[in-house]
Image (tube, helix red, strand yellow):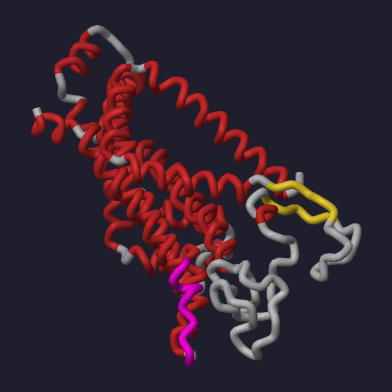
Amino acid sequence: MEAHVATNLVVLLLLVVAGFLAWRLPRNRYWRERLVEIRRRRPLALLGIALYVGVALLDAVSWREELAAESEAASPGLLEARSALERLFPADFQEASYSAPLAEREFYGGAPLRHPRRHLLGTDILGRDVLLLTLQGARVALLVGGLTCLIAIPLALLAGVPAGWFGGRLDDLVFFVVSTLASMPSILLLIALVTAIGRGPLQVCFALAVTGWVGFCRLARGETLKLRELDYVQAARALGVSEWRILWRHILPNLTHLVVITFVLTFSQLVLSEAVLSWLGLGLDGSWGQMIDQARDELSRDPVIGWNLGAASGALFVLILCVNRVGDAVRDVLDPRTVRERA
């Protein structure tokens, strides 16, 4: 199966899951009220995240087409997979080198551009449109944050919940692993893992998940220790309900708010961690961190070339700001402690 076909199937699966959640959650009174409250508190932040998600989906959906004969970048008859986002820009939108935003000539040499005054954020050293690169970086950021959370949170639940429920040697083993990982500098462990397993998207997300599941594992373990002593859990035990059924019916549902809060608040931290990896030359191709890394030498030029750095930094800042704002609202609405304080 070709890479772009597999990506399209993954996007279709995500849309189906999102559609199911959008249909299912409003039917539950608890989640309906919480969603309405979050939307009331952070409408602009939610709109910003929706725009980033929309751009990422446009960049993820692609199909092949025959390149035009007049395109200088390819020969006639060649099939190339281009995303829906790339199709919003001309196929030959690349220039020779730097050009300033909305410029008519190249930054160096002054040669006329093939697309004068159409590069809203200018071009980079390779002549690529900075606006297109910035929009494509949204897909990488959401992939890093979303996929890593989908790996780290289930891993933390699988380790933390049984450790807190059963205790004994299992708890000792999990606590030993968690303590060992927590004692290592996370950035050094992250660099070692990426160097060992490679720089692909799945490898980087796995490395980030390995270094990011420890905190939530401790939280899930502590919450399970508290929940197992509550009266309704003891009543279920007295009625002969099996241990795994109690975990499934009583413990995990009471950890749902922690899962949602952790997902939202961990997302921004993971995106920033990937930016740090890119600064060290170990990040993902096409990410904002890579754009920032490639643009750091441009600040020493005379005159300074800052539009590449400014576009990537601005997009990263707005996304992290929106996610953190929504994360604060989610924590206030779902965390039982804050709900009791407001009451």
The residue at the point 81 percent across, 51 percent down is 65
Q: Is residue 35 left or right of residue 312?
A: left
On the image, the x and y values in percent for residue 264 come to 34, 44
Q: Please identify the residue farthest to the top as the structure is shown.
A: 239
On the image, the x and y values in percent for residue 131 come to 55, 64
> Which stretch did the figure color magenta?
302-311
Looking at the picture, tell me which residue is in the foreground, 201 or 79: 79
304 magenta-colored: yes
The residue at the point 57 percent across, 58 percent down is 136
The residue at the point 36 percent across, 54 percent down is 268
The residue at the point 48 percent across, 69 percent down is 278
Q: Quadrant of the C terminus?
A: top left
Above or below, comparing residue 9 to residue 90 in the picture:
above
Residue 211 in view: no
Q: Is residue 49 left or right of residue 135?
A: left
Above or below, comparing residue 236 to residue 18 in the picture:
above
On the image, the x and y values in percent for residue 128 come to 63, 71
Q: Quadrant of the N terminus?
A: top right
175 magenta-colored: no
On the image, the x and y values in percent for residue 267 come to 38, 50
Q: Please identify the residue farthest to the right as the structure is shown.
A: 77
Looking at the picture, tell me which residue is in the foreground, 255 or 15: 15
Q: Is residue 175 left or right of residue 103?
A: left
Residue 140 in view: yes
Q: Is residue 197 left or right of residue 229?
A: right
